[in-house]
Image: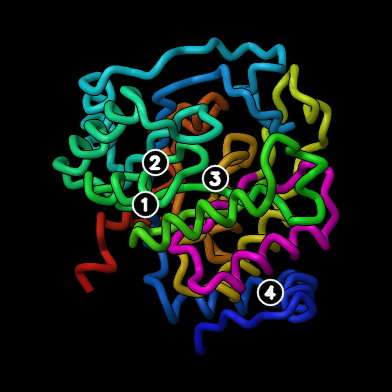
């Protein structure tokens, strides 16, 4: 199977809408061509600066304008973050992602601190990732020089539905940041969230945008909305596992090299539902009790899942070792 960047919406829709068992079978077949079955990357996501964000993302409890239970905290100290990274590594994580609730990176002392965090985590042998909002080309290069391995910047949804979810930045802003990250030779992590009230055409539209980038993201997180009280999306119904399976399987088929990450919403899935997602091509998860500010299955529960499903953790920097 050749890697394609010229997918049409119609082709992606045809894949997405296949009978679900056929879709899973095709995705599982593609998965085995490009990845080792049963190998799953374990990542840890830490909120290094929480809350107080000026954006209006309708799903996010960290937006300052919403009255949620999230307490705003200033940027953590470098030593504290490095201790968390050591703990994550000891728990089996091979990628450590640091998230800050910023609209964009500013060239100030806080950014200097993040650079020190990146350097420190890099020395631990972990793939170091950040999600800090919008970046300039110069900031992306600074992060690369410090040893940043990956940068997460999700598209969230389709371009058509985007304005229903966020008005404080444009879709093009997001694409520009992805371009700056790619140009700095940093691995791109970009996906989205389902269950925000979007239609199937929006889910297909988001996958279309990702799959037609000049290079596919190396990592594609698929999140199910975790509704948070106080946000505009607090009453959204739960996403079914079959919706997640369709997203994961379609992403796997059209972006075969990517790590497809079963991300937010896993806490509301039982073991069998998660197993279906792995069968459909997911090969990465976030571990730890929290994903930034929303609940996530704990370490012990994930250990049990790995044993039951006989999954193996993927080592860090694996594509560089092949």
Query: Residue 135: where, in percent of width, then height?
Result: 46, 44
**What distance separates the C-alpha of mark 4 from that of mark 2?**
33 Å
Going from N to C along the chain, the mark reached first, 1 or 4, is 4
> Reading the chain from its start, which is encountered first: label 3 or label 4?
4
Query: Which residue is identified by label 4?
Result: 23
Quadrant holding the C terminus: bottom left
Question: What percent of the width, then of the height, locates residue 315?
Answer: 25, 56
x 44%, y 22%: residue: 49
Q: Residues within 10 Å of mark 4 (few under 14, many from 20)?
A: many
Is 272 on the left-hand or right-hand side of 16? Answer: left
Q: Which residue is mark 3?
A: 263
Marks 3 and 2 close (CB-CB < 8 Å)? no
Label 3 – label 1 distance at C-alpha: 16 Å
Q: Are marks 1 and 2 in contact (CB under 8 Å)?
A: yes
Label 4 SS:
helix
Q: Circle 2 sits on which residue?
A: 130
Kindly state the secondary structure of the residue where label 3 is placed: loop
Give the foreground label among 3 and 2.
2
**Mark-to-mark CA distance, 1 and 2:** 7 Å
Residue 55 - label: none
């Amino acid at each position: 199977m050749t890697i394609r960047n010229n997918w049409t919406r119609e082709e992606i829709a045809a894949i997405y809408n296949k009978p679900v068992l056929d879709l899973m079978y095709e995705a599982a077949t593609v998965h085995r061509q490009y990845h080792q079955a049963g190998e799953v990357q374990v990542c840890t996501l830490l909120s290094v600066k929480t809350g107080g964000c000026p954006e209006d993302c309708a799903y996010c409890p960290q937006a300052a304008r919403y009255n949620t239970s999230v307490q705003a905290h200033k940027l953590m100290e470098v030593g504290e973050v490095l201790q968390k990274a050591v703990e994550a590594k000891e728990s089996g994580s091979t990628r450590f992602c640091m998230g800050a609730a910023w609209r964009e990176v500013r060239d100030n002392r806080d950014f200097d601190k993040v650079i020190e965090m990146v350097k420190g985590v890099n020395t631990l042998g972990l793939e170091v990732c950040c999600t800090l909002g919008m970046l300039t080309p110069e900031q992306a290069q600074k992060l690369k020089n410090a040893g940043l391995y990956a940068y997460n910047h999700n598209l969230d949804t389709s371009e058509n539905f985007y304005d229903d979810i966020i008005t404080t930045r444009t879709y093009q802003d997001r694409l520009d940041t992805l371009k700056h990250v790619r140009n700095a030779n940093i691995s791109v992590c970009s996906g989205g969230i389902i269950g925000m009230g979007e239609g199937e055409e929006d889910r297909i539209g988001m996958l279309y945008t990702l799959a037609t980038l000049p290079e596919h993201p190396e990592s594609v997180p698929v999140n199910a909305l975790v509704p948070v009280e106080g946000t505009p999306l607090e009453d959204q119904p739960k996403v079914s596992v079959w919706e997640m399976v369709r997203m994961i399987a379609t992403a796997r088929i059209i972006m075969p090299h990517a790590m497809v990450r079963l991300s937010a919403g896993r806490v509301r899935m039982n073991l069998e539902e998660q197993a279906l997602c792995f069968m459909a091509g997911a090969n990465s998860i976030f571990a730890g009790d929290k994903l930034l500010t929303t609940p996530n299955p704990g370490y012990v529960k994930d250990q049990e899942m790995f044993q039951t499903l006989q999954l193996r953790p993927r080592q860090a920097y694996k594509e560089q070792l092949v």
